[in-house]
Amino acid sequence: MADYQESLSPGETGEAKVIQRRRRPPLSCTECRRRKLKCDRSLPCGQCVRSKTAASCVFVGPRPGAISEPSRHMSPPVSRMRMPSVSDDQSGNGGMFVFDSKMGPKSSSNRVSKRGQSDELHELRNRLRTLERALSKPNALQTPETSVGDLFSDIGTSLHSSDAAGVDDRVRFLPDGSFRGKRGKTRYFGRSHYTTTVSFFQDIGSFLRRGHKGVKDVEFNDMKKFKCELWSRESQSHQRAFKEQAFNLNEMVPARTVADELLQLYLDSFDSTFRVLHIPTFMKQYSDYWENPRNPDMAFVAQLLAVLAAGSCFHISMEPEAREIYQTPAMKWIMGVQSYISCTFVSPEIDLRMIQTQTLLLMARLGVANDGDVAWASSGSLIRSAMTMGLHRDPTRFRKGTRPFWCEMRRRVWATIVELDLKISLDRGVIPSIDLDESDCDPPSNWDDTDLIESMESNPAPLSTATYTRNFYQTLLSKSLPLRYHIAKKINALKFDLSYDEALRIGEEMLRFVKNAASLFEDNASSISPSDATRHQFAQSIHMFIMRKFLLALHRPFSLSVVRLPKCSYSRKICLEGSLEILSLMELPSTPDAIQYPHVTQLGSGMFRDEIFHAAITVCVELSLQAHEMSHPGSAMDGMNSSVLMSMVQSQQSVMLQGVERTLHDFGRRIRATGTGSKPYFFLTIVLASVKSRIKGEDPLSQVEASSKRAVRVCRGRLNGLSYSDALAQAENQPAQVCYLRPSLWNLSDTSKTPVVPDGPTPMSGSSLDLDLPSLLSTGFGDFTPMDLGGWFDGLDTGSTELWDNNLFGNLPTIP
């Protein structure tokens, strides 16, 4: 009642008191009100920018963008806001400041909070009054079904619903391309999958769709039938090879020199972060195996083959032919271990050793990109096997298995399983398979493997979390696991209700973890011995890559909505910086002598390929937004020194274009003779062509068509055994040609006229981005349709030509 009394006229008596009408809240900044000018309500506003008084641009009324009295009363205190708030109808003027480091959350909040504490007190009074009104209603009595906590929850939901409702429709409801296929062959990709970001480029979808409706060409239909027949034939061949293979694991083990090399690569790479094995125990078993290889322990042999397969993707030679020497047998090792696990699970016994083998197998399949859409299903099966053993529970609850050695091993294996499931879930755009709220297993401890002995009765001496041990990086990563799990669950929830305030708070916590890790790496750099430098460098790169990946997933929905919500410019800045940092991690030193292997870039064609592709597409989205803003008549360049700003923007665009082009060439060099890796190269080529044409003010569709033909010629050159540089040079100088024959003219006995299907992994057994060979047999795009891509963007290994959705880019807002 205090502020009600304050609103009365002081000179009136009790019965004659009249409530004064409150003044209309000011919406303009103080400078525009003083100068009687129209304010666009941005921060700083356009008038203050033109008059060079941006520093004095302050809003003393309610936040710009508050649209109604109830929503203004129920909004959170302004001091909690970390971003400059801008009117939503200002669709393009909020992005030109995205590169200003001073526009971070702290600097903006300092400006807005100059109103002092009185406004915050006023907000609290209004919220209390709202709660009192809600409690005074007859149907709102406190009962077991309706409590004060529920009322607070409802109020909190109404407070944050405006931000969630303001994001782009493709973020809230997902684009049509996230729901693919028909009848019994469908696939779903969630909000954090790159389909949502790619749908931004509607001109790419227009290019793939235009001019192909009602095609009745007999030759084209015959080619489609032959392609389906080829898919079916390759699928049957793959299944036959699986059935006829004896899978004698002991016979699959390579020579000792090869095994030693691949084992060391695994220990220096995956084992530095994803801990599964107790290294002293495993190395003893390894030595015992080579002393008597004829009578091995098959459980150990299965673990060894999975370890060698995981280490094969880090083979030092950068020649594609040399990499294939290890990649081809790695596929067989994975298949053999999978067969062994399937046969072993006939027995009801599930022990920790089997869980370790399953985890190593999943890691190997991710490393060599041989998992396709079954990765999430595999991780779900692994999660349930681990929960059957109770790995998600506190190890000390098992009274007969409470030795420190087994307790710590259970914690390490469980942490690795959750990390892998979290990685796959975010890649697929689905919620994690495990609810961490239902797990009470403690994070792993920072102990060296040598400190753990199976027969020990008490825990080793505690070490500082900043002390380097073999388990240091897993321990460091586990600290942020609950927060990263919360991000993955919020982003990919069926109903997107994450408010921007909450996203900013989570983002600040993530940045604190990133800064803390960076300071630890810098402080302990002098304590790393030269022999361990490779392992530490790889582990640090993996750690920063994972942290940046989750920051991007958190901010990307708001960054993609910046046209509708200009106040999300901070998310746009974070996404650009994070994407460029991820692309820079993939860059090798210019001098070969300075390269230390294993290097994180060696996962660019396997475990981290989707993340790299998504980062490159995010940079392309930023370039497109800048191109639109530079051409917009009401852009932020008005009233500024346009020549200086143009020079700054062009230099920034040059850096971004160089990063994307370098990534494109990396994808081109990773295309294998089997066609694996062609799809990210193809799509990044046409997206980059669209971006460049927008920056130059040219027609995007013509440039996309020309670049797509060139990309197909490059892929064909790689299939024919050319190096990437030779294939690129040939594609630049060679015009497009139609080089496939009608099936009726093929003589299947004459191999010189028959399209050759390469040996090795087929599109059915390869990675999620394998090449559909028959689609590349033609570069004449007069008869090219989305169906020819065979679902390139599905990230699946189904072998179906029906999974490409013709409405992938339909019903979405175009770039103006």
Image (spheres, helix red, strand yellow):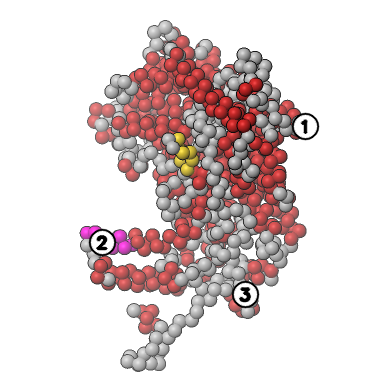
Residues 189 and 345: in front is 189
The x and y percentages for residue 355 are 36, 26
Residue 631 rendering spot, x and y as whole percentages: 70, 58
Who comes first in sequence, dot 1 or dot 2? 2
- Spatial CA distance of label 2 from label 3 is 48 Å
Rate crowding at label 1 as few (under 14), some (14 to 19) or many (20 or more) other CA atoms within 10 Å. few
Q: In the rendered structure, which amino acid carries the disc numbered 3?
A: Lys
Mark 1 touching mark 2, by CB under 8 A? no
Q: Up-down: is 807 above or below 59?
A: above
Q: Is residue 729 visible?
A: no
Report the disc number at residue 146.
Answer: 2
- Residue on which disc 3 sits: 38
Q: Which residues are magenta?
A: 144-152
- State which mark lies toward you, 1 or 2: 1
Q: Which residue is mark 1?
A: 733
Q: Say what amino acid the circle numbered 2 marks.
A: Thr
Tell me the CA gap for discs 3 and 1: 57 Å
Query: Residue 582 occupies which quadrant of the picture?
Result: top right
Q: Choose mark 3 or mark 1, whichever is in front.
A: 1
Is 749 positioned to the left or the right of 491 in the image?
A: right
